[in-house]
Structure formats: C-alpha cells, structure tokens
Image (cartoon, rainbow, N blue to C red):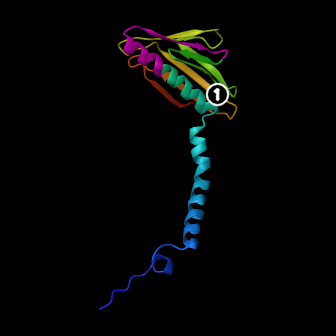
Amino acid sequence: MRIRREHPASGGAGFTLIEIMMVVVMIALIMGMGAPAIYHSLKKEGMRKAINDIEEACNKARASAILSGKPAELHFMPADRKVDAPGMSAQLPDSVNVEMFDVNFTEYKDADSATVRFFPNGRSDDMTVILSSAKNEWRRIDLDITTGIVDDEEFRR
C-alpha cells in the first residue's frame, strides 16, 4: 500500500493567485464603502461639535467639583461662543449661534461672560442653552440642578 502525498505547488492544496486577489478586492470594496461613514462619525463639526463641547465642559466641571471637594466653575462667553472649564477650553463653530443662554433664570445671551457653578455634592446651577445652526438645526441643552447632568434635545421654535 502506497500513500500518495501531494505537494502544495502541484495545485492540490492552497489558494490560487486569483482567489487571493478576489479576497483583497472584496476587502478593499468593503473598506471603501465604510470609510466615509467612519470619517463622519469621528469628525465632529457644526452643531454636533458645539453640543459635545458644552457637554464635555459641564462634565469636566462637575467631575472637578466632586473629586476636589470644592465648587468648580464653568465660564461661558455667549457673544464669543467660548466655553472654559477646569482643564478644557473650547470655541463653538462659527456656523452655530447662541439663541438663548440662561443661568438660574437670568438671561446672559448678550453678556460678556456667565458663570455656572458645580458643587461637590453633584448639584449645579440651573443652565439652559438654545443653539441654532446655519442648517436650521435647533438644539436645547439643559443642566439638571439636582444631578448636574447635561441633557440635550431637538428644539422646535
């Protein structure tokens, strides 16, 4: 009884060059179709950037107050569309306008600066921001005074 062994180069086992090329082409097509979606999800611009910047500033100020055991402040300059919090500073995009900025039921939209305080127990001042964009998007950002957590929602005029 004789056992026959095939050598991989003889065509019995392995993949052909055409099969490998087809797999590479399929992977390239899948990556090509998915790349724009991945790019847009990673690149924040316009309204998404503005909302993320405000939320991040509030979260950093809240965390700073809780961790340090001392009140922390978030400074918002509505006219300049700037936000400063402990360890961060952000400039809102030019395509986003601040339509309303209230802290503790006082309007600061046209003020040079407004301060939102966060306390070590997790509480904060009351804050409401309404933003609009050039694409006619309207968003409302609220800060819950009992938890200091940010909530944003679509806003209709």
Q: Position of residue 114 (x, y in %)?
A: 57, 9
Q: In which quadrant is the C terminus drawn? A: top right
Q: In which quadrant is the N terminus drawn? A: bottom left
Residue situated furthest left in the rendering: 1
Badge 1: how crowded within 10 Å, few (<14), some, or many (20+)? some
Q: Is 112 situated above or below 36? A: above
Tell me the residue at 64%/32% (across/down). Answer: 46
| Residue 32 visible in image | yes
Q: Position of residue 103 (x, y in %)?
A: 52, 12
Tell me the residue at 56%/41% (across/down). Answer: 41
- Residue range in magenta is 59-80
Q: Position of residue 57 (x, y in %)?
A: 51, 20
Total count of labels: 1
The answer to which image quadrant residue 133 occupies is top right
Question: What amino acid type is highlighted by mark number 1?
Answer: Ser
Tell me the residue at 43%/15% (across/down). Answer: 64
In the rendered structure, the answer to whether residue 32 lies left or right of residue 151 reads right
Front one among 46 and 100? 46
Q: Is 2 situated above or below 126? A: below
Q: Position of residue 49 (x, y in %)?
A: 59, 30
The answer to which image quadrant residue 72 occupies is top left
Label 1: which residue? 132
The answer to which image quadrant residue 124 occupies is top left
In the rendered structure, the answer to whether residue 147 lies left or right of residue 153 reads left
Secondary structure under the numbered disc 1 in the rendered image? strand
Residue situated furthest bottom in the rendering: 1
Q: Is 49 situated above or below 99? A: below
Q: Is 143 one of the magenta-colored residues?
A: no
Front one among 57 and 8? 8
